[in-house]
Image (cartoon, helix red, strand yellow):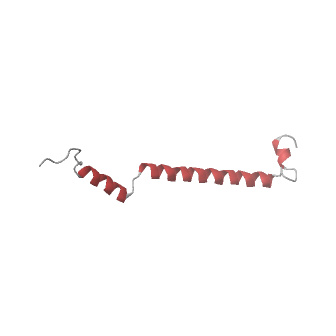
Amino acid sequence: MSGALGRLSTPGLSSAAVHWFFTGLLIAASAGTVAFTGLLLRRLFTTAPEAAATLTASFAAPAPSDEEPTT
């Protein structure tokens, strides 16, 4: 055989079994990268409930005055 199929049928590191093993490894690594990217995007665009409550409370409270109180 000649070409790519001939190379894959030879024993050693260029065997078909090793080819498919590393193909599966590449697919698994790609899936892990996609999942981790999705997790990071989810964390980027969502806010934790306690952080949201703190943010809401800070907007609801009156701003402290920079002026000294007059008597």
How many marks on residues?
0
Between 5 and 15, which is closer to the camera in this rendering? 15
User: Is residue 68 toward the left or the right of residue 52 in the image?
Assistant: left
User: Is residue 52 toward the left or the right of residue 39 in the image?
Assistant: left
Between 33 and 49, which is closer to the camera in this rendering? 49
Q: Residue furthest front?
A: 71
The x, y position of residue 64, in whole percent, is 24, 49
The x, y position of residue 55, in whole percent, is 32, 52
Quadrant into which the N terminus falls: top right
Q: Residue at x 27, y 54 (%)?
A: 57
Q: Residue furthest top?
A: 3
Q: Residue at x 19, y 46 (%)?
A: 68
The x, y position of residue 35, in whole percent, is 55, 53
Q: Residue furthest left?
A: 71
The x, y position of residue 11, in whole percent, is 88, 53
User: Is residue 55 toward the left or the right of residue 61 in the image?
Assistant: right
Q: Residue at x 74, y 55 (%)?
A: 21
Q: Residue at x 57, y 50 (%)?
A: 34
Q: Residue furthest bottom?
A: 50
